[in-house]
Image: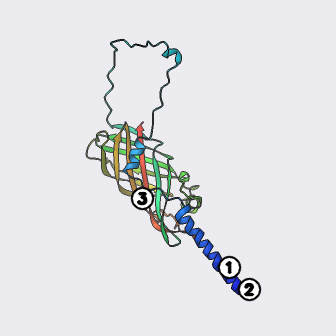
Amino acid sequence: MSTSRKLIYGAVALVVVVVGAFLLWIFVLRDDAPTALDSGDLDAALSSTTVAAVTVPESISESVPETAPETVATTPAPAAAGPDGAWSAAADSTLGYRVQEVLGGIDVEGAGRTSDVTGSLTIAGNQATAAEFTVQMASITSDSDRRDGQFRGRIMSVDQFPTATFVLTAPIDFGAVPAEGESLTATATGDLTLRGVTRSVTFDVEAKLEGGRIGVLGSIPILFSDYSIPDPSNGFAVVKDNGLLEFVLVFDRA
């Protein structure tokens, strides 16, 4: 066999191996992006905090009589407080991005998330009169170190723009004061700042009062050029020119 033919066969074999390895990674080894945040995630976040058990010291427990007195004075439990007042974002909150990618001609999703979110919410009657949240951009991670490096570097420049923020600019009217466990939907309008650029956005939210906590679910469509975000595409992946900022925010009493 001639040397040139050997080189051709070798090149073909190399291409087959590379393509095979790529397809293996896409369909078998690559972790799927988490599914879009939905009402199930909102319910899970609202119920995710557990109260630590109270341990009674032995010296106290031994002094308690085995038989309780026939009558015990009790103090009625306070009535459940309404949602009015100030609330603070809890560690059970989740915020992230979702984008559509094409890898080797195959459509896939890329998503990154973080719980490093701070914020506040003020409720008066059936309205959210004030709200804001801040996310530390460097804390957002996906299933790919390579994607995360691109995200923190040339795409979002987190060293220069370490946070993204949202500030409500008009009250959110839910139409009614939510009952325990009831979900309400409404429209929110505010200023979203990404990569140092601020734009007004309007989007739908779902809110729920449950277990003394408030949860808010929503997503905001993002056109990259609106925020001077460079084209995320590279030699490995082609990314569409838009994405989604999605969140489940959980608030506890401030």
Q: CA distance from mark 2 to mark 3?
A: 62 Å
Taking 63 as reference, is 102 above or below it?
below
Say which mark, if any, is on residue 3.
2
Amino acid under disc 3: Arg
What SS does tag 1 mark?
Answer: helix
Q: CA distance from mark 1 to mark 2?
A: 10 Å
Taking 194 as reference, is 93 above or below it?
above
Residue designated by label 1 = 10
Q: Position of residue 192 (x, y in %)?
A: 43, 55
What SS does tag 2 mark?
Answer: helix
Residue visible at 33% across and 25% down in the picture: 77
- In this view of the protein, which residue sits in the foreground, 6 or 102? 6
Say which mark, if any, is on residue 77.
none
Front tag of 1 and 3: 1
Quadrant location, the C terminus: top left
Q: How many marks?
A: 3
Say which mark, if any, is on residue 199.
3
Amino acid under disc 2: Thr
Q: Residues within 10 Å of mark 2 (few under 14, many from 20)?
A: few
- In this view of the protein, which residue sits in the foreground, 125 or 246? 246
Amino acid under disc 1: Gly
Outermost residue to the bottom: 2
Residue visible at 40% across and 13% down in the picture: 67
Are circles 2 and 3 on residues that touch, CB within 8 Å? no
The image quarter containing residue 154 is bottom right
Name which of mark 1 and mark 2 comes first in the sequence.
2
Q: Position of residue 200 (x, y in %)?
A: 39, 57
Name which of mark 1 and mark 3 comes first in the sequence.
1
